[in-house]
Image: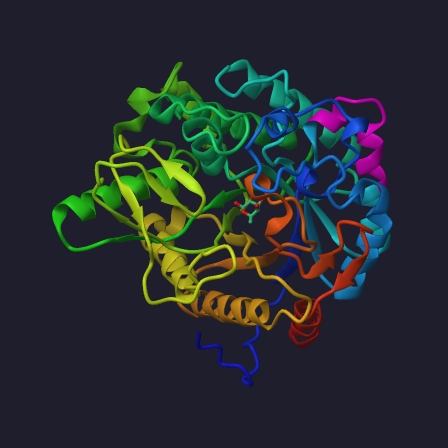
Amino acid sequence: MATDAGNPIPRFPAGFLWGVSTSAHQIEGAAGEREPSVWDAFTAGPGRVKDGSTAEVACDHYHRYREDVALLAGLGVDAYRFSISWPRVNSPGGLDFYDRLVDELCAAGVRPVPTLFHWDLPAALDWLERDTASRFAEYVSVVAERLGDRVTKWITLNEPAEHTLLGHALGVHAPGRKLLFDALPVAHHQLLAHGLAVRALRAAGASDIGIANSHGPTWPASKESADTEAADFYDVLLNRLFAEPLILGEYPSGLGELMPGDVTADLKVISEPIDWYGVNYYAPTKVGAPQGTEIEFGGITMPAELPFSVRDVEGRPVTDFGWPIVPEGLTELLTGFRDRYGDRLPPIVITENGCSYEGIDDQDRIAYLDGHVRALHRAVEAGVDVRGYFVWSLLDNFEWAEGYARRFGLVHVDYSTLERTPKASYGWFRELLRAQR
Ligand code: FCB
């Protein structure tokens, strides 16, 4: 991979927000001190998580948050993106934990940026039910009332696309449903929940609200129409289905007709203006015509009925997870968004970007991040309004169906002792932040 190593990373605009991200289920542990989520129920089933692990202890961040905030302060980030566990807020003392965490962050000079939903739905709820969107807004109001005096930047949802696709269409994430296109109501109800949450946050006085959606360029496997059509379809699902209702107030490609309820009225709620748009970027996807057989891709079984097939991005190095490393895909994605949505595109924040590698002297991660930060700067030079960049992740953590086998952290976690050890990439990011001041 070309890294420009040796040349300093160009300066980002004044006020650019540098941070790192985590999520509650992946780091908190202390599962016995909250009500169960769909992830606890899913993980309990056989063969769901590759290494057979659970998130019961994870990084034990719930008990070690002070140490983790000290790591953030040592890193010198402006902001910390974490998520609030709805099941914990529903449990006695749960909101007190986030109150303490936010106080600790503020005292350390790190701006708290909570995500209100990062996949750990209370086990008693179901996104197939419209009412879950209203319940979400009620929970958001409770959190905003309690933390809104210190939290000034909010994220409604994390990657509703993955939660719909992996959790409800393909069944490899919680709650483990394999509904294929019957999962579309899950998309609509999350989007509705987002819009209702924006309203609830505004009512509580919040003024800096975004979402974290996953995106990546979709590359057709060839110029043949069967491949380009399949790639366009995939692009609608990944890049447009969760962006256009928010940004344009409409569903792409007639998908609105497949959604439940009064879709026209709901789109007014869903398109409630946001202040910025969060993008989680990891890699592009190559997509071709269906191959008529089940396909194993990145640990995910894709059934033969899907109207597309995901292929390898060839000729690229890959991370330990097997994800191709394509920094310029980030520039392509952001300039493509700007070209497609023009002035209607809110300012962009990269809410996740990172890679899975073993080891504490993680030069590969440094090369990955270096390449992506430079690619992001090229998008800025091309005129895209980008306001921030968050590395996934502060700590190695519970990587969903992959368990603890994938290490995304700038800080290594020894899962037997829970000892934290900053990796080489932690030092690299700290120096980058210093140079940007
Ligand atoms: C994203 C998720 C995040 C983490 C990274 C690797 O899809 O939002 O929780 O698992 O991938």
Residue sitting at 15 percent across and 44 percent down? 226
Left or right: residue 418 versus residue 329 is right
Residue sitting at 44 percent across and 77 percent down? 2
Q: Look at the image and say whether residue 88 sits in the magenta stretch.
A: yes
Left or right: residue 398 versus residue 311 is right
Q: Position of residue 239 (x, y in %)?
A: 37, 44
Q: Position of residue 388 (x, y in %)?
A: 58, 58
70 or 314: nearer the viewer: 314
Q: Position of residue 324 (x, y in %)?
A: 42, 60
Left or right: residue 197 versus residue 423 is left
294 or 124: nearer the viewer: 294
Looking at the picture, does residue 66 appear above or below residue 437? above
Image quadrant in which you'd find residue 51: top right
Looking at the picture, does residue 1 appear above or below residue 297? below
Q: Look at the image and say whether residue 294 sits in the magenta stretch.
A: no
313 or 214: nearer the viewer: 313
Region of the chain picked out in magenta, as a range:
87-100
Image quadrant in which you'd find residue 44: top right
195 or 301: nearer the viewer: 301
**How many marks on residues?**
0
Q: Which quarter shows the N terminus? A: bottom left
Q: Which quarter shows the C terminus? A: bottom right
